[in-house]
């Protein structure tokens, strides 16, 4: 049974420790037919106004761009053989302005959380101005951490983004956002 918490700060230390230890995450998106695609990447995370916020320095590949254009919902899964795990359900959006790229470049450099991140200059030699560097902003709406020693699970969910039902911004069974905004049809 999972414990649910209202504040991300209740799981932040465990979230940071696991991600800093595991580092690599499997990012899953879906295509227009609903078929999943997974790739292993290293996002960085910070806490802004008490909520997690992620950033992914990446190449804007045709597959990734098409998947996110059709459905911006994605999941990041972290796992270690000790059975510690973190699962993050998020909405992704491209955020390629130069100021954001510089900020994200620095988050990777100092590692965020500690242990995660790397020198982006290994892939983007032109620094934050490199035209091949693209950034995805990751806004989690659900985070689950699982402790491997006893499989204790704790879940945080974002509060409503404008509605009073606590479900805004999350997809419903119809594939539409519950706040009334349609999810692009696949």
Image (spheres, rainbow, N blue to C red):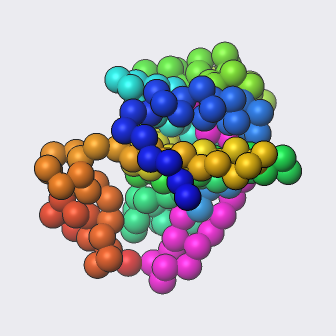
Q: Nearer the viewer, residue 65 or 34?
A: 34
Q: In the shown orientation, is residue 151 left or right of residue 105? A: right
Quadrant of the rendered image containing residue 16? top right
Residue 110 in sight here: yes
Image spot of residue 32 (x, y percent)? 45, 78
| Closer-to-camera residue (184/18) | 18
Q: Is residue 146 left or right of residue 30?
A: right
Residue ID at (64%, 48%):
152
Instruction: Identify the image quadrant of the N terminus.
Output: bottom right
Magenta span contains residue 41: yes
Name the residue: 59% across, 18% down.
106
Residue 79 colored in magenta in the image: no
Query: Residue at image x 39%, y 68%?
Result: 70
x and y percentages locating residue 29 in the rendered image = 54, 64
**Which residue appears farthest toward the bottom when viewing the image?**
33
Q: Is residue 5 left or right of residue 28?
A: left
- Residue at the image position 26 percent from the left and 64 percent from the top: 177
In the image, residue 147 above or below residue 115: below
User: Within the image, what quadrant is residue 119 found in?
Assistant: top right
Whether residue 60 is situated above or below residue 18 in the rendered picture: below
Percent position (x, y) of residue 179? 18, 59
Q: Is residue 61 visible?
A: no
As drawn, 115 above or below 143? above
Residue span colored magenta: 29-45
């Amino acid at each position: 049974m999972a414990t649910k918490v209202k504040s991300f700060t209740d799981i932040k230390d465990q979230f940071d420790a696991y991600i800093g230890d595991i580092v690599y995450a499997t990012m899953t998106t879906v295509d227009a037919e609903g078929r999943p695609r997974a790739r292993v990447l290293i996002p960085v995370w910070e806490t802004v106004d008490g909520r997690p916020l992620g950033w992914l320095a990446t190449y804007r590949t045709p597959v990734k761009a098409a998947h996110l254009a059709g459905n911006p919902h994605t999941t990041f899964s972290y796992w270690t053989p000790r059975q510690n795990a973190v699962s993050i359900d998020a909405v992704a959006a491209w955020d390629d302005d130069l100021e954001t790229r510089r900020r994200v470049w620095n988050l990777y450099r100092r590692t965020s959380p500690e242990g995660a991140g790397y020198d982006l200059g290994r892939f983007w030699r032109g620094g934050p101005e490199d035209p091949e560097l693209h950034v995805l902003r990751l806004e989690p709406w659900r985070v689950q951490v699982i402790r491997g020693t006893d499989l204790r699970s704790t879940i945080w969910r974002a509060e409503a983004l404008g509605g009073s039902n606590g479900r805004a911004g999350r997809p419903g069974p119809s594939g539409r956002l519950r706040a009334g905004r349609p999810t692009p049809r696949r």
